[in-house]
Amino acid sequence: MSRGGLRGRRPNTRHSLRTLSDRSDAEVISLDARRSVFNLYNRRSRPRHSIRQRPMSKKTIALPQQFIFSTEYDVLYSDVNSVNHLGADRVLPIAMEAQLRFIKHLGYSDATAFEDAGLIMAHSEVLYLAEAQYSDRLKIELATDNFKQKSFELIYRITNLSRGSEMARVATTLLFFNYQNKSVIAVPETFLERIRKVETEPIVDPA
């Protein structure tokens, strides 16, 4: 075969390039779509990094050796949800009701503002142990604990008398707040004296 014959059979690269550049918009869009599906499949098929989950630590509220106040409470219709269970958001208000009764039994006429200050809650914890339903009779026991210069704690044990089971435990940290000066004050000594008195003579509220 002559060299001229070889030269005469050179591939028509210009025609090939023109064909590639002259593709219609529909062909380009179709190609891009296939690439997108391919990339999406690859991302989904790759093994995902496992997320290491730490087990949630189970918290508890330690009970004191002695409760200095107890009262009883009937679960109201407004306390239960649509399936007749005591709402989780109602346990803390029930404990607060016991707190107000306790303050009144200490001899204060106003259970929310006394000793020239207001009693405010800085922290709370609730441990749910069992259910309660409408009209169940609850017993709320209260103890004071962890007195510091400007704070103290109240510990509650709530027992469902109707079902014979411990229903919940609650712990709150309280502060005395002077609203006039906008500052936290030290726990008043007269309040501490009343607490010491009921520690020797626990109060049972007939309510």
Image: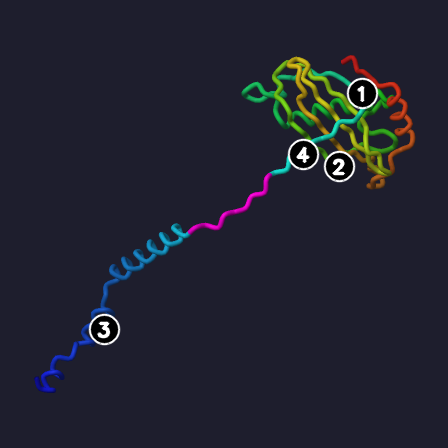
> CB of mark 1 within 8 Å of CB of mark 4?
no
Q: CA distance from mark 1 to mark 4?
A: 25 Å
Q: Position of residue 201 (x, y in %)?
A: 87, 18
Identify which residue, 195 or 52, lies in the foreground: 52
Residue 71 left/right relative to 11: right
Q: Split into 4 quadrants, where in the image is the C terminus? A: top right
Q: Give the x, y percent position of residue 6.
A: 12, 83
Mark 2 or 4, nearer chain start:
4
150 left or right, relative to 122: right
Residue 132 picture quarter: top right
Residue 13 sits in quarter? bottom left
Q: Tell which circle, 3 or 1, labels the residue nearer the N-terminal end.
A: 3
Q: CA distance from mark 1 to mark 2?
A: 22 Å
Q: Residues within 10 Å of mark 2 (few under 14, many from 20)?
A: few
The residue that appears at 91% across and 29% down in the rendered structure is 190
| Span shown in magenta | 47-55
Q: CA distance from mark 4 to mark 3?
A: 72 Å
Going by the picture, which residue comes out furthest to the left? 1
Q: Could you tell me the amino acid type at mark 1?
A: Phe
The residue identified by callout 4 is: 59
Callout 1: SS: strand
Residue toward you, 109 or 128: 128
Q: Look at 9% across and 83% down and name the residue there.
A: 5
- The kind of residue tagged 3 is Leu
Q: Which residue is tagged 1?
A: 69
Q: Nearer the viewer, residue 189 or 67?
A: 67
Q: Label 3 crowding class (10 Å Cα cut-off): few <14, some 14-19, many 20+?
A: few
Residue annotated with mark 3? 17
Residue placed under numbered mark 2 in the picture: 122
Rate crowding at label 1 as few (under 14), some (14 to 19) or many (20 or more) other CA atoms within 10 Å. many
Label at residue 171: none
